[in-house]
Image (cartoon, grey):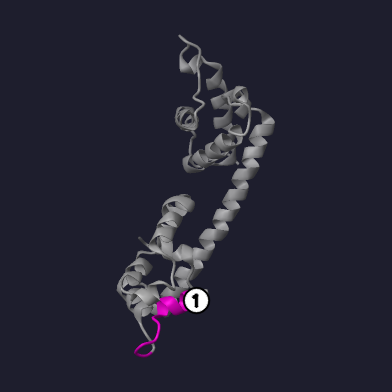
């Protein structure tokens, strides 16, 4: 199926160029040769057509390039080229890995959405209602709902990491209660590094 969103080869080239340079093997074009007349550009055009056929977004192209860079990093320096990236076996390997990651992303995002829907059904759709619900204690001295539901598996570490509501409630726990939930350092690592690629989709689900 052809994507309805055009894939601009110049954008694809810019993504490859930056990621390759960051990885330590920059794209090298013969001195005096314009980019558009180089053999590297021909390979970029081939890859851009593939991305168009697959219906990829620019964000997915960026993930594909990350996969490429990871794969090339395992190869000898002489093989870390755009020419090698455009070979059919490399294209197939990276395409398969991209699909695997997309499937994993879909499952992960669905779990976050399920938790969010559960929270809304239990408390309400507003931030204030959710904070009040998660802060509530069934009796004086009892653990607040946020701790109880985390212990029961209804709230996850990943949900804590991206939910500003959960982060707010965690701020008001006493030290003993706070120790029963993931640390701020761990939550920051999850949201800013480990699962950073999911952040826009998750924030959209959470309405943040």
- x%, y% of residue 185? 40, 59
To which residue does mark 1 refer? 151
Query: What is the residue that sits farthest to the top in this orientation?
Result: 32
Q: Does residue 4 appear anywhere in the picture?
A: no
Looking at the image, residue 130 sits to the left or right of residue 83; the answer is left
Q: Which residues are magenta?
A: 139-152
Relative vertical location of residue 46 with respect to residue 64 in this rendering, above or below: above
Residue at the spot 47% in from the left edge and 77% down from the top edge = 149
Relative vertical location of residue 190 with respect to residue 172 in this rendering, above or below: above
- x%, y% of residue 6? 48, 35
- x%, y% of residue 44? 54, 26
Q: Does residue 95 appear anywhere in the picture?
A: yes
Relative vertical location of residue 38 with respect to residue 92 in this rendering, above or below: above
Residue at the spot 55% in from the left edge and 35% down from the top edge = 69
Q: Secondary structure at mark 1?
A: helix
Quadrant housing the N terminus: top right
Whether residue 169 appears in magenta in the rendering, the answer is no
Which of these two is toward me, 156 or 117?
A: 156
- x%, y% of residue 138? 39, 88
Which of these two is toward me, 118 or 155?
A: 155
Residue at the spot 49% in from the left edge and 64% down from the top edge = 112
Question: Dot 1, how many residues are within 10 Å of its Cα: few (below 14), some (14-19), or many (20+)?
Answer: few
Whether residue 144 appears in magenta in the rendering, the answer is yes
Looking at the image, residue 87 sits to the left or right of residue 105; the answer is right
């Amino acid at each position: 199926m052809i994507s309805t969103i055009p894939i601009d080869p110049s954008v694809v080239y810019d993504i490859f160029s930056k990621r390759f340079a960051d990885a330590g093997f920059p794209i090298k074009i013969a001195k005096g040769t314009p980019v558009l007349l180089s053999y590297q550009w021909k390979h970029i055009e081939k890859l851009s057509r593939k991305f168009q056929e697959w219906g990829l977004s620019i964000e997915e192209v960026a993930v594909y390039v990350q996969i490429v860079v990871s794969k090339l990093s395992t190869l000898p320096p002489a093989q870390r080229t755009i020419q090698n990236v455009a070979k059919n076996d490399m294209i197939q390997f990276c395409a398969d890995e991209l699909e695997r990651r997309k499937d994993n992303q879909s499952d992960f995002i669905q779990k976050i959405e399920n938790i969010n829907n559960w929270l809304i059904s239990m408390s309400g759709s507003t931030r204030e209602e959710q904070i009040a619900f998660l802060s509530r204690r069934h009796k004086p001295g009892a653990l607040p709902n946020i701790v109880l539901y985390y212990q029961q598996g209804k709230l996850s570490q990943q949900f804590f990491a991206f939910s500003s509501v959960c982060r707010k409630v965690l701020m008001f726990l006493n030290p003993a209660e706070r120790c029963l939930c993931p640390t701020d350092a761990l939550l920051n690592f999850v949201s800013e590094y480990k699962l950073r690629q999911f952040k826009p989709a998750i924030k959209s689900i959470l309405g943040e």
